Image: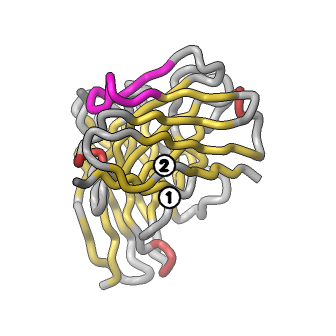
Amino acid sequence: DIQMTQSPSSLSASVGDRVTITCRASHDISNSLAWYQQKPGKAPKLLLYLASRLESGVPSRFSGSGSGTDYTLTISSLQPEDFATYYCQQYYFTPQWTFGQGTKVEIK
Amino acid sequence: EVQLLESGGGLVQPGGSLRLSCAASGFTFSKYAMSWVRQAPGKGLEWVSSISGSGGRTFHADSVKGRFTISRDNSKSTLHLQMNSLRVEDTAVYYCAKDSLEGRVYPNQVDFWGQGNLVTVSP
């Protein structure tokens, strides 16, 4: 089974900060990676797919990069509505999806 | 507007059964692979099952294989998850999830999610 290791598991940041979350796959997933945002009590929301493609309607402060086994989600200037938990998902081995453990972004 | 409305969750004893349903609207249901993803209380996301648009191909995680069955009724735009031999560790919020691109047998990223349906397995 493919493993997705996400880090950090949590972080504290202030409004306006640049935030970076990483996701490492145990095998090359050839950019078959999505990022989701989840707020408490709500369903996840798709932010990016194919590692770096922004989903329609998602603010441009969100960006993704990476290749092979290592991927990054960056929020260029953290906004109050961005405090949430973020998950990566590999779908290279679809339909055997694997999600990262999540990164909780909290207010400093 | 895409909507996925789930129903059928609740409290059940270990060894019992439940059937989850997800009523879809706002898109051509039969053209999209659909999936179930669950989230145990305070935990991360776990893929459970997927089904192709036609219903001809189904896939299940090892943790539920032989106990859960995904199916769909394209005439009613409804997705189902039949859950048998339930275990305490199956306790979770279950989300139905729509593939982002029509025509795929194997789903990729999810562009719409249901609101979630809590299944609690407890003696």
Q: CA distance from mark 2 to mark 1?
A: 8 Å
For the residue labelled by badge 2, is the local secondary structure a helix, a strand or a loop?
A: strand
> Furthest residue to the top?
B56
Tell me which corner region of the image, top left, top right, bottom left or bottom right, holds residue B68: top left
In this figure, which colouring scheme has been used for the structure? secondary structure
- Residue A107 at x, y = what percent? 34, 82
Chain containing mark 1: A
Height in image: B81 above or below A55? above
Observer-nearest of B68 and B103: B68
User: With B35 as the anchor, is B30 left or right in this view?
Assistant: right
Residue A92 in view here: no
Residue occupying the point 56% across, 51% down = B7
Q: Residue at x 39, y 42 (%)?
A: A89
Q: Which residue is mark 2?
A: B95
Does A30 sit above or below residue A104?
above
Question: Secondary structure beneath disc 1?
Answer: loop
Disc 2 residue type (three-letter): Tyr
Could you tell me which residue is drawn at 52 percent across and 39 percent down? B109
Badge 2 vs badge 1, beta-carbon distance below 8 Å: yes
Label 1 sits on what residue type?
A: Ala
- Specify the label residue A43 is tagged with: 1
| 10 Å crowding of disc 2: few (<14), some (14-19), many (20+) | many
Of B117 and A21, nearer the camera is: B117
* Mark 1 neighbour density, 10 Å: few (under 14) some (14–19) many (20 or more): many
Indicate yes or no whether the magenta region holds residue A27: no
| Residue A54 on image: x %, y % | 58, 50
Q: Specify whether disc 2 shares its chain with disc 1.
A: no
> Considering only vertical position in the picture, is A51 above or below B33?
below
Q: Which residues are magenta?
A: B58-69
